[in-house]
Image (spheres, helix red, strand yellow):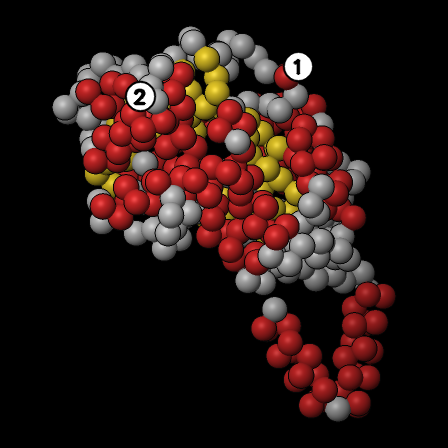
Amino acid sequence: MRNARNTRRRSVKIGLPAVLLALLVAAFATGCGGSSSSGSSSGSSSSGGAKLDVVGYSTPESVYAETLEPAFEKTAAGKGVSFSNSFGASGDQSRAVVAGQPAAVVHFSQAGDMERLVEEGELVSKDWEKQPYGGYATDSVVVILVKKGNPLGIKSFKDLETNEEAEVVTPNPFSSGSARWNIMAIYGSAIEGGASPAKALEAVKTVLEKTKAQPGSGRDAFSAFSQGEGNVLLTYENEAIKAEKEGEDVEYVIPPTTLQIETPIAVTAKASEPAAEEFLKFLWSDEGQELWAENGYRPVNPKLVDPVQFPAPEKSLIKISKFGGWGKVNEDFFDEETGSVAKLENELGVSTSG
């Protein structure tokens, strides 16, 4: 945005004759069939086409750039559309949009990051959950990624507490949405197993005490694990599927009780291009959902979920609504001053500044 403003100021200083000359040159280039393009981090620009700024959480970056956006550009609605992408830790990305980062489409890891945009400037409609499929682009589940052959025999979140050799990697929950899913999966599994809330929080504490690294995002956590940090990674199912497809020396375990991950998506109030809404429609279409599935994400359309590719947990699949939804969960567990998990992390010397 700063560069655009500077360009306008310079054009005023040039003066009228130079402006007329520039217009004549542009007209001549157009008459000769010339065109220009501007770079973007994914997709290809097209003269006169819409440019969509997509801001998202870290893990689906390559899916957008290599699959979803090129597929949309081939549709009638996507003809001439180009994309500019920004992906990172979900909480950081949400705060960046509030601070003014350009965004036409936002896709976060958890609903609390979407609600921030509603509450701080009405950057997203308060009715975003009334969109198709509750406003969620994809589903996933929290899984446990281990070394090939599962040498520690890890099968459940409980095993992470009891196995003395377990060295865990999970992102920092005060920057990463995936980390919050991971922690609530541990907590929820303990509750489903009959533990009291206090005992379930002790289970979370034990796992955090065994955590060797808490990088800023889910993607950074995966990179740390791949480079030899720890021997157990808590992650999205789609990340684990991607790792296996790429030949990493790993395998993943779906715990008997785990948490369903729902990732919210919306068009922002500042999106001026109709193509933004069309892009969302594409992502929810059968074609879009099948592309998500090919990349390890569970479709939000239940008719498209392959039970072989995406098996149900052995015992139960918990939803965050069991604990009051993300509004209550973020306040009770992840408030930087009063949240129960924030207190645990402070005791362990982990940053909760977000």
**What amino acid type is highlighted by mark number 2?**
Phe
**Residue 6 visible:** yes
The structure residue drawn at horizontal position 20% and vertical position 33%, both measured from the top left corner, is 210
Q: Are marks 1 and 2 in contact (CB under 8 Å)?
A: no
Q: Position of residue 175 (x, y in %)?
A: 41, 48
Q: Residues within 10 Å of mark 2 (few under 14, many from 20)?
A: many
Relative placement, left or right, of 162 versus 335 is: left
What secondary structure is marked by label 1?
helix
- List the residue tagged with mark 2: 157
123 over 3 or under it: above or below: above
Q: Nearer the viewer, residue 118 or 251?
A: 118
Q: Nearer the viewer, residue 325 or 51?
A: 325
Disc nearest the viewer among 1 and 2: 2
Quarter of the image for residue 348 reads: top left
Relative placement, left or right, of 63 versus 155 is: right
**Residue 261 visible:** no
Total marks placed:
2
198 over 266 or under it: above or below: above
Report the quarter where the N terminus lies: bottom right
The structure residue drawn at horizontal position 60% and vertical position 27%, both measured from the top left corner, is 291
- List the residue tagged with mark 1: 303
121 over 254 or under it: above or below: below
